Image: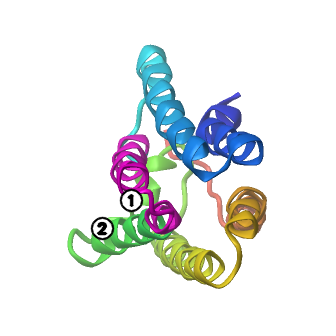
């Protein structure tokens, strides 16, 4: 259920794009993101990631609609991925914390593994940002939308699966 709730705005964006094009899809994504935040707030589980995503969709989606220029909405995933990479990298470099360890607090791992995990996610987010930028500005808008939805979800699932296999070798029993 959480997976569906997390991808709710993206899936509605895709449906709206196929049905009515980029302008309607952008408006739907903004509205769906607001509904998503309200849902998570009602359930008591709204996270900083959701707030950041909402802010970026409102700014870039709003610019797309106001200026009637789809360039802004195409930049949205790249900015979001780079924001995630920057937050994780700053956590490690400035505060000497692995923010992923805070998110996954129920998993016991040695500090060196948390560091590897953090840097692998930083690299993944940078790669996703670069890939989104390339597809957005070298292919048609329809190809970009298809990639953004199905390619993005697929790459995230694949990367998470690989990370899960990596973590399974290193998980230790938490001390009680």
User: Within the magenta stretch, is there residue 73?
Assistant: yes
SS state under label 1? helix
Q: On the image, numbered disc 1 is attached to which residue?
A: 99
Q: Earlier in the sequence, mark 1 or mark 2?
A: 2
Q: Please provide percent x and percent y for residue 40.
A: 48, 25
Q: Is residue 54 above or below residue 83?
A: above
Neighbour class for label 2 at 10 Å: few (<14), some, many (≥20)? some
Q: Please provide percent x and percent y for residue 161.
A: 77, 61
Q: On the image, numbered disc 2 is attached to which residue?
A: 91
Q: Is residue 38 left or right of residue 108?
A: left
Q: Quadrant of residue 47?
A: top left
Q: Quadrant of residue 144?
A: bottom right
71 or 94: nearer the viewer: 71
Q: In the rendered structure, are the residues bearing label 1 and label 2 in contact, judged by CB atoms less than 8 Å apart? A: yes
Q: Quadrant of the N terminus?
A: top right
Residue at image position (54%, 32%) is 32
Magenta-tinted stretch:
50-77
């Amino acid at each position: 259920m959480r997976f569906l709730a997390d991808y709710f705005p993206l899936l509605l964006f895709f449906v709206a794009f196929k049905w009515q094009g980029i302008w309607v899809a952008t408006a739907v994504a903004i509205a769906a993101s607001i509904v998503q935040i309200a849902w998570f707030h009602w359930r008591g589980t709204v996270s900083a990631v959701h707030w950041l995503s909402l802010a970026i969709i409102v700014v870039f989606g709003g610019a797309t609609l106001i200026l009637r220029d789809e360039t802004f909405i195409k930049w949205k995933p790249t900015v979001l991925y780079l924001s995630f990479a920057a937050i994780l990298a700053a956590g490690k470099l400035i505060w000497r914390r692995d923010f992923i360890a805070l998110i996954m607090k129920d998993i016991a791992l040695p500090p060196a593994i948390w560091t590897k995990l953090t840097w692998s996610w930083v690299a993944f987010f940078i790669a996703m940002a670069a890939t989104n930028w390339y597809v957005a500005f070298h292919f048609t808008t329809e190809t970009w939308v298809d990639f953004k939805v199905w390619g993005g979800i697929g790459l995230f699932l694949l990367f998470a699966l690989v990370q899960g296999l990596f973590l399974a070798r290193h998980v230790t029993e938490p001390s009680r």
